[in-house]
Image (tube, grey):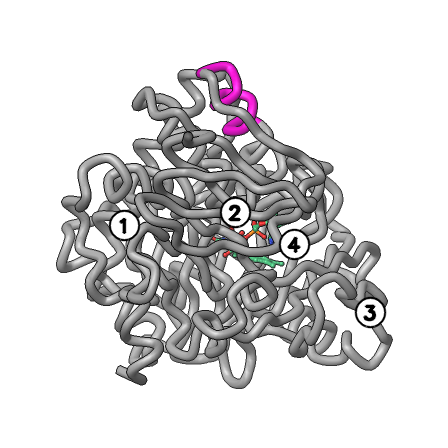
Amino acid sequence: MMDAEVAVIGIGTIGSMTMWQLARRGVKVIGFEQFGTGHDRSAAGGESRIFRTAYLEGSEYVPMLHEARKQWRELEKETGYSLLHLNGGLMIGPAEGDTIRSVMKSIETHGLEHEYLEYDEAQKRYPQHKLFPGEVMVLDKQAGFIRPEFAVVSAVQRSEALGAVIHRYTQVESIEPDGDGVRIVANGKTYKVGQVVITTGPYTKKLLPEQASPLVTRRLVMSFFATTKPEMYTPDKFPIFIRRSKHFDISGKPTLEGTMVKVMLNQGYDEVDDPHNLNRHIAIDDLNQINEAVRELLPDLIADPIRLNAYMDAYSPDEHAIIGRLPDMPRAIALYGFSGHGFKLAPAMGRIAADLVVDGGTPFSIEQFSPERIRSGR
Ligand SMILES: Cc1cc2nc3c(=O)[nH]c(=O)nc-3n(C[C@H](O)[C@H](O)[C@H](O)COP(=O)(O)OP(=O)(O)OC[C@H]3O[C@@H](n4cnc5c(N)ncnc54)[C@H](O)[C@@H]3O)c2cc1C
């Protein structure tokens, strides 16, 4: 006797959207979350996440990003909440650098709405950024930010309204193939389901030490800086940005609070051995790089952060997620290792998970994300 057709393990960013997408297709789904829903002990949190479409990580993401935008709007429609705010996005770097080149490749391949701003024009339109000679900006019109905690909570609420059941404060200890289904042990109790979707993010290696062994969990620190000119940093005047200049690799967003700007380094600060013991203490020495970036690149900000938060994400060796059925457990579908850029994609990932569960395949091209590539070192 099955407890449900499908179980989703880990109701964070991707798991909450997977629950919603399964529930709206009428699938009997149960979810397990070790904490409460919308918590801040993992990858989601800290007020905002960037959404962008002109993707420097690869133009092959663009169809999934279009789908994500559509699904964010559908979630907004179904819940009545505002989640995705498209105030534009600036990609900033040397005209001939890899960042601008790959952003332009996404734009040209998919005909995306944009503006290319040469140095003088860019400096005039967006004086908040101090450019180096030879730098340009590309304005991605389909970019902006999402509210992460609220997005997770909204998808959870909606899926419960559609009949999904979520076991909160319930940690999954093991999953194993069991005849025509999968056996799950959680908080000491056994469940049986037809298929399982694993969306355990930074904690995946604890649940699947062998399959997820190539993943590394990294700590990411968000820093908020006060500005001397708050009127210049409102969402309508200050698009989200990604900047790769000299040795700096940073991103930033306006804050909803209004007198601060959020800026963070795009690479992880350090490896997290045990995600249950994420080091939330941020040492003064950890801030040298971000303070230097703010001093050099964003002259209207005061280069001492006034608010700091630590989160974490699971990184795969090639920094692309792992999506697909696990080779040694074909009733298990993996969606993890989003490597610092998965939030914007979440509702599209939920749709892909539901496609795989219900239809056995998806129209989106996910071959490059296969779990096999990680194990075979492709
Ligand atoms: C500081 C920071 C800034 C970022 N900025 C951006 C951005 O601007 N734009 C963007 O697109 N992406 C961004 N990202 C990346 C994005 O947030 C992540 O890729 C995404 O949130 C990962 O989602 P996830 O579902 O894999 O993990 P999570 O959201 O962490 O979800 C995993 C869930 O599984 C639960 N869980 C784990 N193990 C178990 C278990 N055994 N039993 C029950 N529950 C379990 C956890 O408690 C958690 O709720 C950022 C990440 C960080 C950390």
Earlier-in-chain disc, 1 versus 3: 1
Q: Nearer the viewer's eye, disc 2 or disc 4?
A: 2
Q: Is residue 142 visible?
A: no
Q: Does the magenta stretch include residue 157?
A: yes
Does the rendering let one see residue 177? yes
Question: What residue is shown at x 31% (from left), y 44% (from top)?
Answer: 180
What residue is pinned by disc 1?
A: 114
| In the foreground, 347 or 146 | 347
Alpha-carbon span between mark 4 and mark 3: 16 Å
Which amino acid, by three-letter code, is at mark 1?
Answer: His
For marks 2 and 1, the one nearer the N-term is: 1
- Dot 4 corresponds to which residue? 42
In whole angstroms, how far apart are the C-alphas of marks 4 and 1? 33 Å
Per the picture, the main secondary structure of the magenta-coloured stretch is helix
Of marks 4 and 3, the one in the foreground: 4
> What is the spatial separation of the Cα atoms under label 2 and label 3, in whole angstroms?
37 Å
- Mark 1 Cβ inside 8 Å of ligand 1: no
Image coords of residue 367 (percent x, y): 19, 63
Compute the Cα span from label 2 to label 1: 47 Å
Residue visible at 24% across and 35% down in the picture: 358
Q: Is mark 4 within 8 Å of ligand 1?
A: yes
Point out the tag, 2 or 3, that comes first from the N-terminus. 2
**Residue at the disc numbered 2:** 184
| Placement of the N terminus among the 4 image quadrants | top left
Left or right: where 255 falls relative to 323: right
Q: What element carries label 3?
A: loop
Kindly tell me whether mark 2's CB lies below 8 Å from ligand 1.
Answer: no
Mark 1 surroundings: few (<14), some (14-19) or many (≥20) residues within 10 A? some
